[in-house]
Image (tube, grey):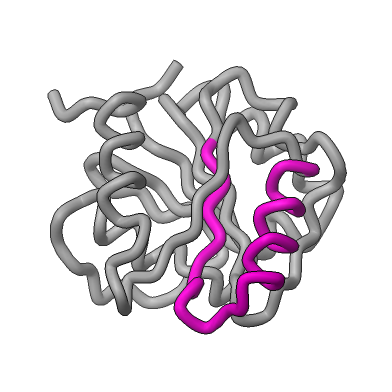
Amino acid sequence: MGDRLMIIGLPGSGKSTISDLVEGETSDHQHREDCLYRSRSFEVPGSYIENHWMHSIVIMLSQNQASGVLLLIDGASGETLYSSGFARAFNEPCLGVLTKCDLLSEEEREQGLARLVDAGVDMALCLSTTTGEGVNELLDWVRNVAPNE
C-alpha cells in the first residue's frame, strides 16, 4: 500500500482542484498524459479511464502507490465511464465525489450520487469548491485515509 491519495476522473472533473485541496497549495502544472505525483496525492489522467484497456493499470497503480482512492464525476457534464462495481477492484478505501454540485438540481445530485454508488464506492459526497459544500467532509476523509506524516 502506498502513501498517496489517488485521484481518478475524466478530463475537467476537478482532479487538479481536489489535489490542490489535499496538498494545501495550488499547482500551475500543465495537463499531461501521465500521472502527476505530488507529496500527498497523485492524479490519474482522464485518458486512463476513457480507455478501458488501461483500467488494469489504474488498479495496479492503486495497489502499489495509493492509501485511498477518490473517484470523481463531473457534476456539470454528468459523464461517467465507470463500469458497475469498478471501485470494488481497489483494495483501498474509495470515496466517490460528485463535483461542481453548486450547478446541480436536487434530482441531478441524486442521479450523480447514484452513479457513484453503482460504481461501487464505499461512500459518496457532493462537492463544490465554489460554495465550500463538502470540502470539510472530503478533507476529514482524506485525513483518516492518508494521514500527513
Q: Position of residue 99 (x, y in %)?
A: 50, 66
Which residue: 80% across, 59% down? Answer: 81
Q: Is residue 22 above or below residue 112?
A: above
- Which residue occupies the extreme front position in the image? 106
Q: Is residue 67 above or below residue 7?
A: above
Which residue: 46% across, 68% down? Answer: 14
Residue stretch rendered in magenta on the structure: 95-118
Which residue: 35% across, 25% down? Answer: 145
Q: Is residue 108 left or right of residue 72?
A: right
In magenta segment, residue 131:
no
The image quadrant that residue 55 belongs to is: top right
Task: State which quarter of the image contains the N terminus.
Answer: top left
Q: Is residue 40 left or right of residue 30?
A: left
Q: Position of residue 6 (x, y in %)?
A: 46, 41
Q: Position of residue 121 (x, y in %)?
A: 64, 36
The image quadrant that residue 120 belongs to is: top right
The image quadrant that residue 80 belongs to is: bottom right
Which residue: 60% across, 70% down? Answer: 74
Q: Nearer the viewer, residue 98 or 52?
A: 98
Q: Is residue 134 left or right of residue 53?
A: left
